Image (cartoon, coloured by chain):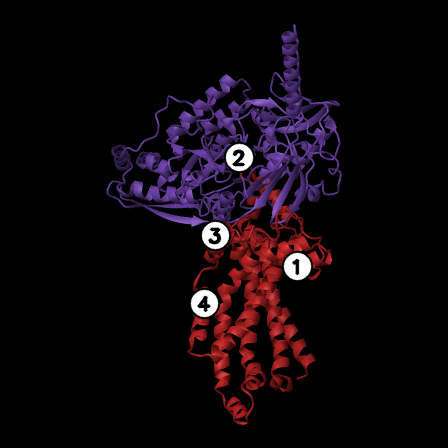
Amino acid sequence: MSPAAFLIRRLCGVILVILGITLVTFVTLHLFPADPARLLAGPGADDAQIQAIRRDLGVDRPLPVQYARYLRDLVHGNLGRSIQTGQPVADDLAKRLPATLELAMVTMVVYVGLSVPLGILAAITRGRWPDLLIRLVAVGGLAIPPFWLGFLLQLVLYRELGWLRQAVGRIAPSLPPPPFLTGFYLIDAPLGGDWAAFGSAAVQLVMPVTCLVLSRLGVGVKLTRTSMLEVIGSDYVRTARAKGLAERAVLARHALRNALMPVVTAFGVQLGYLLGGTLVVEVVFGWPGIGQYAIGSITAVDFPAIMSVTVVISVFFVLANLVVDVLYLYLDPRIRSA
Amino acid sequence: MRLGTLCGRAVGTLGLLGLLALAGLVAAAPAGTVTFAIPSEPPTVDPAIEVAGPGYRVLLQLYEGLLEYRGNTTELAPALAQSWRVAPDGTWIELKLRPNVKFHDGSMLDAETVKASIDRTKAVNRGGAFFLTTLKEVQVVDPMTVRLVASQPSVSLLYGLPKVFITGKARLADADRGAAFFATSGNGTGPYRLTRWEKGQQIVLDHFPDYWRGWAGNHAAQVIQRVVPAAGTQQLLLERGDAHLVVLASIGITQDPKELAAKPGMKMVETPAFRVTVISMNTQKGPLKDIRLRKALQAAFDYEGMVQVYKGYAEVPNSPIPRGFTAAYEASLPPFKRDMAQAKRLLAEAGYQGKPLTLSFIYTETEPQARLAGLLMQQSVQELGITVNLEGKPFATLAAQIANLETAPDIQATLTMTPRSADPGELLRTLYLGNNAGKSFNYSWYASADVDRLLAEADRTFDDGKRMALYREIARKLIDDAPSIWAAYPKLVEVMRDDVQGYTYSPLNYSGIFSFYPIWLRH
């Protein structure tokens, strides 16, 4: 199969998966025994007020009609109007999503940047102190709940040591956020020449990123280590060594590329999880991302907002997996020739 | 002579200095930034929608009503209207507007604007419209006088006016009646303007230089409401001085505020509030339909234990009416108290002696005191052989379950009830009006023709003395009918930095909702 045909097939799969997710989410939400109109109307409202709000929201129509309308709007990029804020959900998400994406991307870069070298180091020093130390730190991070770790970081770095001046937010409250271009402060600030905002945004990332990385590092390190150990012990690596190649060349050229295959898969899945999994960290660090938005939406039974957050996270999850598949094409020639 | 001249000069100099000091005081510019850590940002700041909760925290700074409550009392006072009079038959209220009041966009307050603003609130038909249910029409009498014509004589309309905020009319002609504008911006007459809202991070309010009350004396120049969702983190910000005030939901429930207030640079403000904790019993379905069983539960309930749930910052009630409503509150009623002998007698009369009885009890899982009230109820009735099954639910599910009599539980721990109006009729209608059965907060499904009639009569009675007598009669009737257990009168406790000055308790608002106009920072 040509790479193009492979991609088309995978994209068709992606669309079907997303359609399935919208259907399941839609039905589940509407089976939920709660009435958004009643919540919106407030405790003093009478039945006529509640009925009027139901009509406005369109939740008085049969479920299949509501779903068909939802899909029609979705195709046109209209995610609906939030019941809570009264604003288009797309606008709300456009303000929130970049915050979560920036946090997830920076976390991913640090996570991969630490997991792979530490995993390799642990593999090649197997059983010796660097291996034991790395595994101890990695597994320790896994064992600590992220909210607790977050609070611990705030307690130590913010309150006790005072190294970090702010405990919450994307930027120091005294600084205006950079003008919106991409929504990523680390990109928008330098593009606007605002280095103070860039510095503050970078500092504000320290605690949430540390928290997210530490709570996942164990997975990345152990995966890389196990995969590396498996490859190092294989016949072709033994052959490479027997040919007299230098250990560095054996590891870099022969072992690493093959060892990375399962690791890449895991990282793809981790990226997907990260988008939905920043929720707790967003709460602890007052990070204005979709996690916080999702909590507010769930509490208020804001159907359009919950649907959209679910769909957006699913799309990113599926896309992350698609990227992994494409990376496979590059890493594994067998897939290209299959 | 020389001495006299010297004295004269000294007196003159001192007088001049005094005048200068006075002038300095009068001309004192607002200074400093007060930072308020809030657990969540409002979904909207539309004054026609928000009447409580996080949005109200912002609205109180941006907008004003035609009337307001005087200080921390239930007395009505002039605000945007400088005077008012009620028709002899109570069917209209005429309000003379205050001259020279500017909106944040520079436009002036007049009768046309007031009419357009109230018409919008009524048309949006959400939170603010709750206070306008009896309003038929707003008439412009002259450029500075409006007349609110009611469909029936209505005290609730008059007492609701402090919560009906007046907006400038610039955006009211938009196709959406200003919905998009008012959701995220503001145009009121209040002391602060909304200058920046960084979604999910902070709301920045700057003082409005043309505010009609002026800026003499001490005031904050800027108020920042900073979103800090985690209670632990809010506390850290307070301890470090990065927040001056916080809304700590857990204070007085899971944590003794004294512990936090004892830390350096902190203080605690404790005020009796207009609040009552209500445990509703289903009067229309299940075993509690029997009044004797409801009274048995009332008698068995551990009221002193409930005060301890609030870490001691509460009082044992004696009436469904909170004590703050001094005119309607009847101090001579005996406080509720635990009486197990009485409970056992009532249980036997109802035919449940030695007979197993299981009751369902649901509560809002985000309200720690509601869960603790449930546990207390479990313990209180254990000795009677009654089993109470507790179930915590999100508010949305709980409200839907109670709204349907088929699914409504036997008992429900209502949130701590804070009245929304300075007239106790609002609270009593919300909790006990027959039309509100299962919704509003009438979670007891209580419907009494007598109480409905008395409530309607009270709303038609503008004579304060007569109306208060009616409320006292309603309270006694409710005590007889026992639709609820009135579990506590919780106090309001706020912990703040000790440099915060001018904080005024707002009895008719939830914890952490007050005007920032009188607040300033001592340097």
In the picture, the quarter occupied by the C terminus of chain B is top right
Asked whether disc 3 touches disc 4, contact meaning CB atoms under 8 Å apart, the reply is no
Colour of chain A, in one word, is red
What residue is pinned by disc 2?
A: B499
Residue A291 location, quadrant: bottom right
| Element under disc 1 | helix
Direction from residue A21 to residue B447 in the image, left or right: left
Comparing B504 with B338, the one in front is B504
Identify the mark at residue B130; answer none if there is no mark: none
Q: Amino acid at mark 3?
A: Leu
Separation of disc 1 and disc 3 at Cα?
A: 26 Å
Residue B56: % across, % down = 58, 38
Identify the mark at residue A155; answer none if there is no mark: 3
Separation of disc 1 and disc 2 at Cα?
A: 36 Å
Asked whether disc 1 touches disc 3, contact meaning CB atoms under 8 Å apart, the reply is no
Q: Above or below — where is B66 with respect to A296?
A: above
Q: Upstream in the sequence, badge 3 or badge 4?
A: 4
Separation of disc 1 and disc 4 at Cα?
A: 29 Å
Chain ID at mark 3: A
What residue is pinned by disc 1?
A: A186
| Circles 1 and 2 on the same chain | no
Separation of disc 3 and disc 4 at Cα?
A: 20 Å
Direction from residue B154 to residue B118 in the image, left or right: right
Q: Above or below — where is A242 with respect to A333?
A: below
Colour of chain B, in one word, is purple
Residue B81: % across, % down = 66, 23
Q: Upstream in the sequence, badge 1 or badge 4?
A: 4
Asked whether disc 2 touches disc 3, contact meaning CB atoms under 8 Å apart, the reply is no
Comparing B490 with A79, the one in front is B490
Identify the mark at residue A137; answer none if there is no mark: 4
User: Callout 3 environment at 10 Å: few (<14), some (14 to 19), or many (20+)?
Assistant: some
